[in-house]
Amino acid sequence: MAVPLDRQDAYPTFARKQVMQEGVFRRRQLPHWDVDDKPVFITACLAGSLSAKGLKRIRQYRTDLDNRECPKGLTLQEWETRKSKLVFRMVDQMLDYHSPVRYLEDDNQAETVSNALLHFAGARYELLAFVVMPSHYHWLFRPLESWVASLIEQQHKNSACNVRTPRERITQSIQSFTANECNRIRGASGTYWQGETFDHWVRDDDELSKIIHYIEQNPVKAGLVSTAEEYAWSSAAERFRKQIDSIQAQS
């Protein structure tokens, strides 16, 4: 019997948690590297949004990259980061142009996700950019120091609680709420999102600017609109509507 393919099958399967020089690195099916006080770039995909054929291509590409030697001038950490970016680029192209599942073409579901991302902006995190595409969303945020401090205090008071990073707390809350709400809108049940997200911590201001541009131009690149501000479910449209430079909590 064939084993059903999931997006995570494109990646090596082993679990580890390692304290790096900067932050904490975990690998489940995808790598997760959390660094304090740094913006995080998240990509979350709908369950089934990558075809079996696409997953095989991604898995083979990742294997090919893993078999290559680390290029001269790069540390092993830098090479791992570069490989993840290369795989991400392939995945994002498939999601934009070849995804068989596009629930978020429905405005009600897209609005639900967009509103969820806006809801805790200014309370739990600084929302730097987002876009809700038909098969996935991109999200760039920085956990607020005051909220992180309250989270740490809560964990110290309850030593039995499951210790999760601020990124994990924030993203899992969004994923759980939007999955339930969007399934309700669809009149369906079952898995809505893929089990894990892509995440990448932002190294510097130059990379931050590039990621914001990448996120907000995604609908333009995918041929959905002519300008970023036209795409309703995005930070570009949100700033344009409110005539503001940065995004705060939804009013």
Image (cartoon, rainbow, N blue to C red):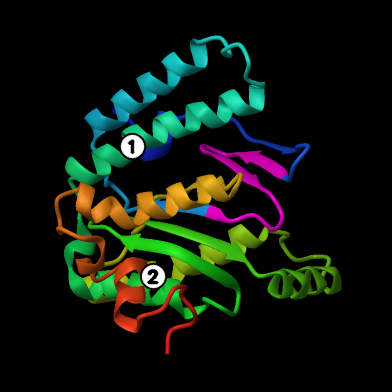
Asked whether disc 1 touches disc 2, contact meaning CB atoms under 8 Å apart, the reply is: no
Task: Say which quarter of the image contains residue 98.
Answer: top left
Q: Quarter of the image for the C terminus: give it.
A: bottom left
Q: Is residue 228 visible from the viewing direction of this image? A: yes
Please give the residue where the numbered disc 2 appears in the rendered image: 178
Q: In the picture shown, does residue 135 fall above or below 53?
A: below
Please give the residue where the numbered disc 1 appears in the rendered image: 91
- Which residue is more in the foreground, 14 or 58? 58
Q: Nearer the viewer, mark 1 or mark 2?
A: 1
Task: Say which quarter of the image contains residue 95.
Answer: top left
From the top left corner, tell me how far across and down residue 79 is, in percent.
57, 23
So how many labels did they put on this image? 2
The residue sitting at 57% across, 50% down in the picture is 205
Residues under labels 1 and 2: Cα distance? 22 Å
Q: In the picture shown, does residue 227 fall above or below 53?
A: below
Q: Does the magenta stretch include residue 113?
A: no
From the top left corner, tell me how far across and down residue 94 is, in percent.
25, 38
From the top left corner, tell me how far across and down residue 125 is, in percent.
58, 70
Q: In the picture shown, does residue 169 fall above or below 93?
A: below
The residue sitting at 59% across, 80% down in the picture is 123
The amino acid pointed to by label 2 is Thr
Q: Is residue 135 visible from the viewing direction of this image? A: no
The amino acid pointed to by label 1 is Val
Task: Spot the residue most to the bottom.
Answer: 251
Task: Say which quarter of the image contains residue 244.
Answer: bottom left
| Secondary structure category for the residue under label 1 | helix
From the top left corner, tell me how far across and down residue 104 is, in percent.
23, 63
Crowding at mark 2 (Cα within 10 Å: few <14, some 14-19, many 20+): many
Q: Does the magenta stretch include residue 27?
A: yes
Q: Give the range drawn in magenta.
A: 24-40
The residue sitting at 51% across, 17% down in the picture is 66
Horizontal side of residue 134 vs 37, given as left or right: left
